[in-house]
Amino acid sequence: MLVLSRLQDSLRKILSPPGLHTAVLLTPSGQLVSFASYESRCKDEIRVIAGLSGEVWQETQEQGSGMVDSELGRIVVLPVDEAPELLPMPLPDDYQPLMLLVLNSTDAVEWDDLQTKGKALASQIAKPLSKFRQHLVVHKPPPLLHGGSSAVTSPARAR
């Protein structure tokens, strides 16, 4: 069974205020699963971080992680997934990680430190989450067509 309180405890333990102040766990499609924040951030700010992180991931997933400097501070987006040797090779085109881990800090925290802490936590929480892979995996959406609509939502005449 997936215990959200344990996930939240893991997210809380990585925080080192005031530098690294927020950790968010979300699905690759951007759905918020859990978060921990030192600053008493409202849930709307967490949703903004989740939305921005989803965009960063979509643009940088081929690189294996994403980083952005924003008004909210430094944001690092990392995949939470099984160990690379357990993943199917080659990866299918529609492959998505189990979850995304997002760390948000001030400019005082070095990018390398965020990456190191994030990768360690992602590895730790991937083990219990991998048991639920068949329930958690969401495939990539279909690519956009030239007209700007997807194959699923292509314009059709109303009947």
Image (cartoon, grey):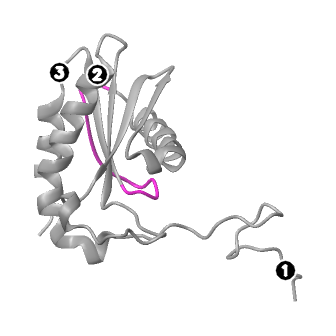
Picture coordinates of residue 142, whole percent (x, y)? 61, 70
Amino acid tagged 2:
Glu
Label 2 sits on residue? 39
Locate the C terminus and report the quarter of the image it occupies.
Answer: bottom right
Q: Is residue 44 left or right of residue 23?
A: right
Q: Disc 1 designates what residue?
A: 156
The residue drawn where x is 41% and y is 70% is 138
Residue at 29% x, 22% y is 39
- Whether residue 157 is situated above or below residue 87 in the rendered picture: below
Q: How many marks on residues?
A: 3
Q: Which mark is residue 136?
A: none
Q: Nearer the viewer, mark 2 or mark 1?
A: 1
What segment carries the magenta color?
27-40
Q: In the rendered image, which quarter is residue 3 located in?
A: bottom left
Q: Position of residue 72 (x, y in %)?
A: 45, 22
| Residue 16: mark in rendering | 3
Question: Which sits earlier in the primary sequence, circle 2 or circle 1?
Answer: 2
Percent of width and height locating residue 5:
13, 51
Q: Is residue 131 visible?
A: yes
